[in-house]
Amino acid sequence: MSAPLLEVDGLSKSFDGVRAVDGLSFALERGRITAFIGPNGAGKTTTMRIAATLEIPDRGDVRIEGISVLEEPQQARLRLGFMADQFVPYADLDVEQYLQFFAHAYGLRGLARRRTVASVIEFCGLGDMLRRPTTGLSKGMGQRLHLAKTLLHDPPLLLLDEPAAGLDPRARIELRELLRELAAAGKGVLISSHILAELSEIADALVLIEAGRLVLAGTTAEAQRAVREHHLIRMRVLEDNRRAERWLLTQPQVREVKVLDEVHLQFDFTGDERAMAELLRRAVEAGLGVVSFATEEADLEEVFMRTTRGVLQ
């Protein structure tokens, strides 16, 4: 059985007596975008920096494709791409020179380097910016260049620390599309962000930590089941939502019916999917004029609020 793409094993790290990471363990799979979330000071950046070989832990280890970042840091670096939370431009380089410089630093030479640089330029949409100084880029284009640099050596693992911070809506959408393409190509992406609503749209899995300790890890579906034991259903009717409300309150396994507006209602349902289908059948037969009837999954914001305690450190 092959090793996980990323394995964090009993990681601990303190700064000036404050435990930033405390016995943290989790694993990340290929082809998934994993949201790495937690309150400020939870230890996300410290964990990522250790995984990127930029910090040494007090205890524990991180392995990338089975390779220890402590014992074989050079081999580990070939397998990871780290995008820090802030892009640092080089004052004397334009966009193409910047990428050529880092491609050379990764050991790429000659035709291989030119082809690789051309490939990341095309993938990240930097073709019109090649002669622009790196100090003159917008926030969004700077993040594109930052991501392009991270991809130069084609690493299977990407560690992205707040990549969408400060981006406008269009740039965030474009970044999300790039990340989806990377995951579809088989790369594993660990992404930290405080913009949980956007992470909900792209994350396949999550790792949630607080005070340096693991709170929850798994697929998004597993996380949703962990925080919500029942189904939250949103129903739309043609008219007379008050009648629909009164009817729902008489039904078994229906709880906390809320009228959202003239045509939408929301309610908790404690039954299984077969019982849900039966409820819908009865609603149609009752003449409620049901237009739509669907479950609403718990998003990352709800998971975050239900599982963290607001611990500061």
Image (tube, grey):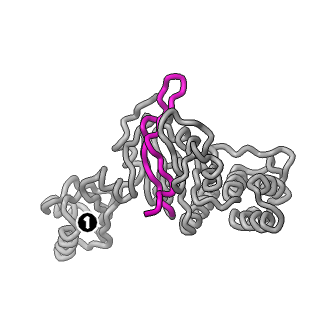
In the image, residue 124 lies at what x, y percent?
A: 69, 62
In this rendering, is residue 298 above or below 92?
A: below
Q: Farthest residue in the front direction?
A: 71
Who's the residue at 61% across and 63% down the image?
A: 178
* Image quadrant in which you'd find residue 310: top left
- 1 vs 311, nearest the viewer: 1
Residue 8 image offset from top left, x and y in percent: 47, 46
Image: 74 above or below 58: below
Disc 1: which residue: 240
**For residue 222, side relative to residue 90 (left or right):** left
Q: Secondary structure at mark 1?
A: loop
- Quarter of the image where the N terminus is located: bottom left
Residue at point 50%, 37% (across, down):
43
Residue 10 part of the magenta-drawn span: yes
Tell me which segment is drawn in magenta.
Answer: 1-30
Q: Is residue 297 left or right of residue 9?
A: left
Secondary structure mostly seen in magenta is strand
Task: Please name the amino acid that badge 1 sits on.
Answer: Asp
Q: Residue at x 51, y 54 (%)?
A: 66
Q: Nearer the viewer, residue 10 or 236?
A: 10
Q: In the figure, residue 154 lies in which quadrant?
A: bottom right
